[in-house]
Image (cartoon, grey):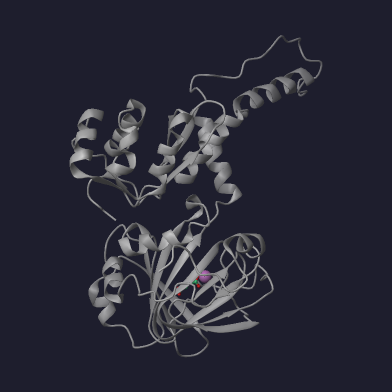
Amino acid sequence: MGTTLIFPDGVTAESFLQFFWQRRPLLMRGALPGIASPISPEELAGLACETGVESRLVRQQSRGRPRWKVSHGPFRAATFRKLPPTHWTLLVQDVDKLVPSVTRLLERFRFLPDWRVDDVMVSYAVDQGSVGPHWDEYDVFLIQARGRRRWQIANARPSPDNVLPDEELRIMARFEPDEEWVLEPGDVLYLPPGVPHWGVAVGDCVTCSVGYRAPSHRELASSWFEHVLEGVADDAYYRDGPMQPPAHGAEISPAAAARAVELVETLAGRSRAEIERWYGAFLTEPKPNLTVDPAEPPLTPDEFRRLFEARGAIYRHPFSRFAYLPKEDGCDWLFVAGESYTLPKRHRTFLQTVCQWRELHFGFLAEWLGESDCVDLLARLYNGGHLAFDDGA
Ligand code: SIN
Ligand code: CO
């Protein structure tokens, strides 16, 4: 198996990014040849019974006009035994954080930045199972991992009111497909945001969706202003400047307005460096159900180094996202699970190595382990629970 997707003839990773990414759908037949489903339906159902795992069961009611009903996990094993032979599908989010073989799938997608990936959702459907025609506001690679699924897509951007009333799932009221393909194991369909699609299982099948959910402007603004608020003192208040008795009691004088403008600019105005640092932390922030526990007991940098040498390898916790920002002025920044760390830029190759591999062998890092900056950083990541000596993936 290669290290990336096999793009169709005439398409490379570079031309994919230039002509398709966020723009146009692309069917990639045989993009992952020989793929075996990275998870069995039984394992997926097992995950859907666990608390802290986000799962949904979507049933299509077969009588009358099509309707879809969704229920949320955790489920009881008995629920699955009572399901009919057709028209349902089970979907589990964040399987890349839970199942090592699904985590490894992401290696094939490194032609895009790691920090753009949201999760791998895995669905198991019985014959004719689907979540109905809909569109998503994010990019997705739909990997056919087992069995077959018929995908239909429409070319025109849907109108926002084209949705069925009273459905928890945003299912389209009218869906007129322009193209249709039956995907076989190893085929991948890329869809940019806003493309109406409908995937219906042909016999039972497993689909892995690598999702690139981009933050909305509202989410960005909310996180940024929350960050700004953290830096605003509780006990600081507006104060008047020099004043004259007002000629008209209701007037907001130009001087008072100017004072307010200056105050808000001072409260909100931040340096480019601070915005970049907030952004790196924001991008690596874990979902609330995917936070890690600190190491018990914590180790000193020396103890950590000795144990690392003895154990030979250390593993990234699958919940913890890593990203770094190289800076030409000052130190580079590392972002892990919403926290930021700095490191002198002479250690950039060390930082790149730490971010590149989920499994870090002592030998990969040995040349930097005499440097206290580097060992201290690894020990902090270990103590925070982001690196561990056991492969928890
Ligand atoms: C599925 O895997 O059934 C649904 C994926 C999607 O349509 O987004
Ligand atoms: Co979709």
Quadrant location of residue 276? top right
Tally of marks? 0
The location of residue 354, given as percent across then percent down, is 38, 42
Instruction: Return the residue nearer the eye: 70 or 240.
Output: 70
Q: In this rendering, would 276 be left or right of 382?
A: right
Outermost residue, bottom side: 63
Would you place residue 125 above or below residue 4 in this image? below
Q: Which residue is drawn at 53% across and 19% down?
A: 236
Q: Split into 4 quadrants, where in the image is the C terminus?
A: bottom left
Instruction: Return the residue nearer the eye: 377 or 191.
Output: 377
Would you place residue 378 above or below residue 357 in this image? above
Outermost residue, right side: 247
Q: Which residue is drawn at 55% across and 42% down?
A: 222
Instruction: Return the residue nearer the eye: 142 or 130.
Output: 142
Q: Residue at x 74, y 23 (%)?
A: 257
Q: Split into 4 quadrants, where in the image is the N terminus?
A: bottom left
The location of residue 62, given as percent across then percent down, is 45, 88
Instruction: Return the residue nearer the eye: 308 or 96.
Output: 308
Residue 386 can be seen in this image: no
Would you place residue 353 above or below residue 42 in this image? above
The location of residue 223, given as percent across then percent down, is 52, 41
The location of residue 323, given as percent across then percent down, is 46, 43
Residue 86 can be seen in this image: yes
